[in-house]
Amino acid sequence: MTNPQAQTTVETLRWRSERLELIDQRVLPAQIECVACDSAASVAQAIRDMVVRGAPAIGCAAAYGVALEALRHRDAGVEPFRAAMAQAFEVLAASRPTAVNLFWALARMRSLIRQSAELLPPELADALLALAHEILAEDVRINRAMGAHGAALLADGARVLTHCNAGALATGGHGTALGVIRSAVEAGKRIQVIADETRPFLQGARLTAWEMVQEQIPVTLITDNMAGFLMSLGEVDAVIVGADRVAANGDVANKIGTYMVAVLARRHGIPFYVACPLSTIDLTIADGGAIPIEERAAAEVTGFRECQWAAHGVKVRNPAFDVTPADLVTALITERGVIHCPDTQAISAVMAERPAA
Ligand code: MRU
């Protein structure tokens, strides 16, 4: 089987020896290790535990989770196969609630099953695996298209702040927000990245900074509470982030802290861009208020790994995402082009052009 990620530097997901290998994002950059998954349940667990994270990467992993379960039950007979598949969809859908790419990928896998009533389990399992490979390869193509559109928005020499990790590690390869930066660099622009640390899971410090250092793209790491000060000093020219779900009106759910950055950017007259594939736009949700926001374990806030620094028993809130209202978003960068001042009308016009999945 060819490797759809051949052109990218980081292999977030890899199909090898009939298993899905995931680079373990919990231990990066100190250790570069893989977790191998051989069932839908093990993929769901990897998503829940943040071995794999980032909306498009979660979608790709979920597609492989369905394929793995189909392969496991390919010789089981039609009824047990169907029951196993129903269970697989259920367990994967329950893994994380906010990133809509997960549900989008599951819908594509389910739709293939519906359209393939004539196939026996072994043939259907092969077809599902082929679709999982295609979803992964397509993600890289989409990120490259977004990169090309978004790179045009960045001036040579721009200092670009990003929050969380929307890079190769969060996708099938190249990245969404970091994909725009990579494409700008490939086009010869001298971009300097400012990476927010991104408490509490430290995706910026551990993952974004690592990706940029690997590729020798200049990067400066800051803690989240430094962004406003740097903006006030005139040290930030643009903000680019990814998204986990964009509502029909353009409200953007992304990593907790994104809203704060968007407000600061508006205060300082800095453009705030969101790079998101069309699969991240959820037209069934009218506005951001209806986007389900995952609440994660208190231990992520009271400490890190084995170290606890907060008082035992303290009450904790740990929403993993927040919602940035559309009016703070300068533009959405999609594979179909840039949607300036996104609103319901502009978004539905672009979505209507989308070819059927
Ligand atoms: O909790 P995470 O690490 O899965 O959150 C990831 C983000 O919020 C990303 O910014 C988003 O998924 C876009 S990734 C291209």
Image: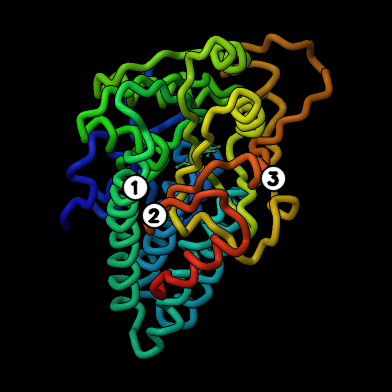
Quarter of the image with the C terminus is bottom left
Q: CA distance from mark 2 to mark 3?
A: 28 Å
Give the residue pinned by disc 1: 149
**Residue 269 location (% of width, % of height):** 58, 27
**Residue 242 makes an appearance in the image:** yes
Q: Amino acid at mark 2?
A: Gly
Task: Name which of mark 1 and mark 2 comes first in the sequence.
Answer: 1
Could you classify mark 2 by the number of other residues whose Cα lies within 10 Å: few (under 14), some (14-19), or many (20 or more)? some
What percent of the width, then of the height, locates residue 77?
A: 40, 81
Residue under numbered circle 3: 293
Rendered view: 211 above or below 90:
above
What label does residue 26 carry, if any? none
Report the residue at 68% width, 44% height from top. 325
Within the image, what quadrant is residue 133 found in?
Answer: bottom left
Position of residue 146 measured from the top left corner of the image (x, y, whole percent):
35, 48
10 Å crowding of disc 3: few (<14), some (14-19), many (20+): many
CB under 8 Å between discs 1 and 2? yes
Numbered disc 3: secondary structure: loop
In contact (CB < 8 Å): disc 1 and disc 3: no
Q: Amino acid at mark 1?
A: His
> In the orientation shown, which residue stands out farthest toward the front?
269
Identify which residue is drawn at 31% across, 17% down.
Answer: 218
Counting residues from the N terminus, which is met first, the one under dot 2 or under dot 3? 3
Residue for point 53% across, 65% down: 89
Tell me the amino acid under the disc marked 3: Ile
